């Protein structure tokens, strides 16, 4: 079993007009972009790795990532790698879905 975490941009919500069911509520679209940077821990060995750094570097140029997006992604990957190596960072709440 592997813990695999995608590094993404912060979710952003945007109102985009009336909902299709014709209620008075507005529809909301939530977007978040996968930055092609992943942190994994292989449970059998405990090995923790940050994957696809080369792809992340390539996409920084190709898609003109802002400096704050790059910095936040790297900081998140570093924090998650340390957390996965040191402890169970998600308090085991996901275990019911793995069963």
Image: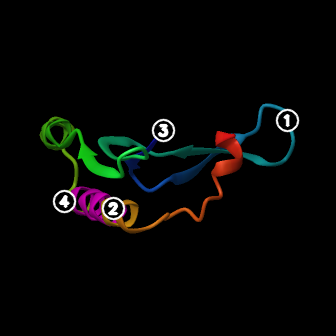
Q: Main secondary structure of the magenta part?
A: helix
Closer to viewer: mark 2 or mark 3 = 3
Indicate which disc, 2 or 3, sits on the residue closer to the N terminus.
3
Q: Crowding at label 3, few (<14), some or many (≥20) Cα neighbours within 10 Å?
A: few
CA separation, marks 2 and 1? 40 Å
Q: Quadrant of the C terminus?
A: top right
Which quadrant would residue 44 be assigned to in this image? Answer: top left
Q: Which residue is mark 4?
A: 67
**SS for callout 4:** helix
Q: Residue furthest top?
A: 20
CA separation, marks 4 and 2? 14 Å
Closer to viewer: mark 1 or mark 3 = 3
Q: Is residue 10 above or below residue 24?
A: below
CA separation, marks 2 and 3? 22 Å
Q: Crowding at label 4, few (<14), some or many (≥20) Cα neighbours within 10 Å?
A: few
Question: Mark 1–mark 3 contact, CB under 8 Å?
Answer: no
Q: Residue furthest front?
A: 44
Closer to viewer: mark 4 or mark 2 = 2
In percent of the image, x 44 and y 67: which residue is there? 87
The disc label shown at residue 47, or none: none
Give yes or no for residue 49 being in the magenta stretch: no
Which quadrant would residue 38 be assigned to in this image? Answer: top left
Q: Which residue is mark 2?
A: 76
Q: Which residue is mark 1?
A: 22
Q: Which residues are magenta?
A: 69-80
Indicate which disc, 4 or 2, sits on the residue closer to the N terminus.
4
Foreground pick, 77 / 35: 77
Question: Mark 3–mark 4 contact, CB under 8 Å?
Answer: no
Foreground pick, 78 / 64: 78
CA separation, marks 1 and 3? 45 Å
Q: Which residue is mark 3?
A: 1
Closer to viewer: mark 3 or mark 4 = 3
């Amino acid at each position: 079993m592997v813990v695999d975490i995608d590094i993404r941009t912060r979710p952003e919500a945007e109102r985009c007009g009336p909902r299709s069911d014709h209620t008075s509520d507005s529809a909301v679209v939530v977007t978040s972009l996968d930055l092609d940077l992943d942190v994994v821990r292989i449970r059998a060995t405990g090995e923790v790795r940050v994957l696809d750094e080369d792809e992340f570097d390539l996409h920084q140029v190709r898609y003109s990532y802002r400096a704050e997006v790059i910095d936040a992604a790297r900081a998140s990957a570093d924090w998650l790698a340390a957390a996965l190596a040191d402890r169970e960072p998600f308090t085991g709440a996901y275990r019911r879905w793995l069963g």
